[in-house]
Image (cartoon, rainbow, N blue to C red):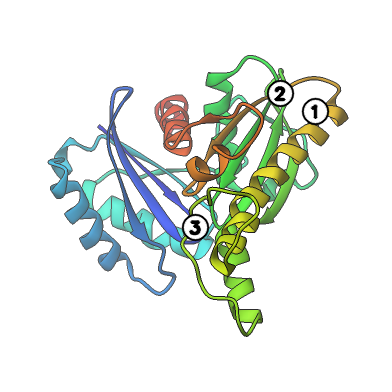
Amino acid sequence: MILVLDIGNTNITVGVYKGKELLFVSRMATDRMRMEDQYAIELREILSLYGVSLDQIEGAAISSVVPVVNHALVNAVRKLTGVTPICVGPDTKTKIKIDVKNAESVGADLLVGCVAAAELFDGPCIILDLGTATTFVVMDEDRRMLGGAIAPGVGISLDALTSRTAQLPSVSLEAPEHVIGNSTAECMRSGLIIGTACMIDGMCNRIEKELGRKCSVVATGGLAKEIIQQCERKIVLCDTLLLDGLRLIYEANHDIN
């Protein structure tokens, strides 16, 4: 079995694969102050909860956008399982050509998403990740990462609204029934959810215009399902895109480590 961990700014997503089958998905809070033993204890409890014993883990792969957490989590995995995880970086074998300035600064999550998307689509594609930030990554038919765009995530936008205004309340992030809200909460949901969907439609249209050809679009992230239902264009939802990409990267790299 292969343990995969995607370290995001808010959560660490945990999964275990048996071959190509994803046995479970769980999450831990990303805590920059937590020590490796604390991560090891929680990770051990998660594996136990889903009936996976430590001696069944044959390998591991990690992607991260929070470098300060990497060392603790790598050591936690090594301490629990005896295996050294593959940590995704610019030098990791992926078959993705990084055609951007400062390739060494490309986020591991963006690279992992491209690896998984390349298995889904033959032609150019746009990979959306709707998490703490809303990111667009553009990849052409030759598996070249061309760049993309980054916008504030819906959660960050909500936090900004509620903290910078005197009378706007915090609201649940679910789509309203109408674009024209008739209460403050509905107006906020419309702007946050439907507004983000319109931004996605518009950005994808602009990207296709700049490329001069149509793109497939795949979305992942905590709010992806809620938001892409409000989009006008066809978008494939893949909740496990980054975990799938980590599995593929592990398979391509474990023999050379």
Gap between marks 1 and 2, in whole Å?
6 Å
Q: Residue at x 30, y 57 (%)?
A: 76
Q: Mark 1 points at which residue?
A: 208
Q: Residue at x 45, y 29 (%)?
A: 256
Gap between marks 1 and 3, in whole Å?
29 Å
Res. 15 visible in picture = yes
Dot label at residue 173:
3
Q: Which residue is drawn at 16% across and 43% down?
A: 50
Crowding at mark 1 (Cα within 10 Å: few <14, some 14-19, many 20+) = some
Q: Residue furthest bottom?
A: 166
Dot 1 and dot 2 residues touching (CB under 8 Å): yes
- The answer to which of 207 and 170 lies nearer the viewer is 170
Crowding at mark 2 (Cα within 10 Å: few <14, some 14-19, many 20+) = many
Dot 1 and dot 3 residues touching (CB under 8 Å): no
- The answer to which of 21 and 169 lies nearer the viewer is 169
The amino acid beneath tag 1 is: Glu
Placement of the C terminus among the 4 image quadrants: top left
Q: Which residue lies furthest to the top in this view?
A: 122
Dot label at residue 180:
none
Of mark 1 and mark 3, the one earlier in the sequence is 3
Foreground disc of the pair 1, 3: 3
Provide the secondary structure element on which disc 2 rests. Answer: loop
Placement of the N terminus among the 4 image quadrants: top left
Q: In this view, does 237 lie to the left or right of 50?
A: right
Of mark 3 and mark 2, the one earlier in the sequence is 3
The x and y percentages for residue 69 are 45, 63
The quarter holding residue 232 reads top right
Q: Name the residue under label 2.
A: 215
Provide the secondary structure element on which disc 3 rests. Answer: loop
Provide the secondary structure element on which disc 1 rests. Answer: helix
Dot 3 and dot 2 residues touching (CB under 8 Å): no
